[in-house]
Image (spheres, rainbow, N blue to C red):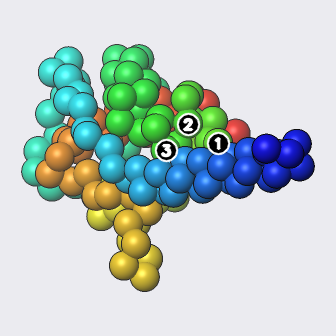
Amino acid sequence: MKAVTRRLLTLTLLACAGSLTLSGLAGAHGDVTPQPVDTGNLKKLGPDWLDVNPYRGNPEAIRIGHSAFAQNCARCHGIDAISGGIAPDLRKLPEGEEGDAILQGRFRFGSIRNGVTYMPPFEGILSQEAAWAIRSWLDTVHQE
């Protein structure tokens, strides 16, 4: 086989492998098996969702939230919330109630556009306590 033909074949195979890898990543987005979050040390919040994070600044919630994020969110939003571009960089969520509302909406209902799931809903899968613990940790890594 001539060198030019061999190079062309190699480049074609690499391109095909790359497209399979990229399509696999796109297909995997949102396809996360939720991991349980132990919120037993946090005050129970009840069935009605709160509008404001009740755990803001709580060291135990922050610890739990960091672990919960690593197990349930980092695959798409990046290790320590440093996004690699697949999903939004959650370090840039607005502070305070505005960011609380955004997180709550996405956590509960997910993000679906034109029939494509960009983020699955987690309501009923992870607890409100887990959501607010994650938000508490995200507050500690916030960036403008």
- Name the one closer to the observer, 19 or 44: 19
Task: Give x and y (percent) for residue 31.
Answer: 33, 50
Query: Looking at the picture, does residue 64 appear above or below residue 109?
Result: above
Mark 3 residue element = helix
Query: Which residue does the numbered mark 1 point to in the structure image?
Result: 84
Q: Give the residue at x 60% y 30%.
A: 141
Q: Give the residue at x 64% y 42%.
A: 84
Query: Which residue does the numbered mark 3 point to in the structure image?
Result: 76
Q: Spatial distance from mark 2 to mark 3, Cα to Cα?
A: 6 Å
What amino acid is found at the position of numbered circle 1 in the picture?
Gly
As drawn, the label of residue 78 is: 2
Query: Looking at the picture, does residue 5 appear above or below residue 72?
Result: below
Query: Looking at the picture, does residue 95 appear above or below residue 43?
Result: below
**Can residue 42 be seen by looking at this rendering?**
yes
- Name the one closer to the observer, 57 or 34: 34
The outermost residue toward the left is 47
Task: Give x and y (percent) for residue 102.
Answer: 46, 59
Q: Residue 71 sits in which quadrant?
A: top left
Task: Give x and y (percent) for residue 8.
Answer: 80, 52
**Can residue 56 be seen by looking at this rendering?**
no
Q: Determine whether label 2 and label 3 are within 8 Å by CB.
A: yes
Neighbourhood count class around disc 3 (C-alpha, 10 Å): few under 14, some 14–19, many 20 upward: many
Mark 1 residue element = loop
Mark 2 residue element = loop
Q: Determine whether label 1 and label 2 are within 8 Å by CB.
A: yes
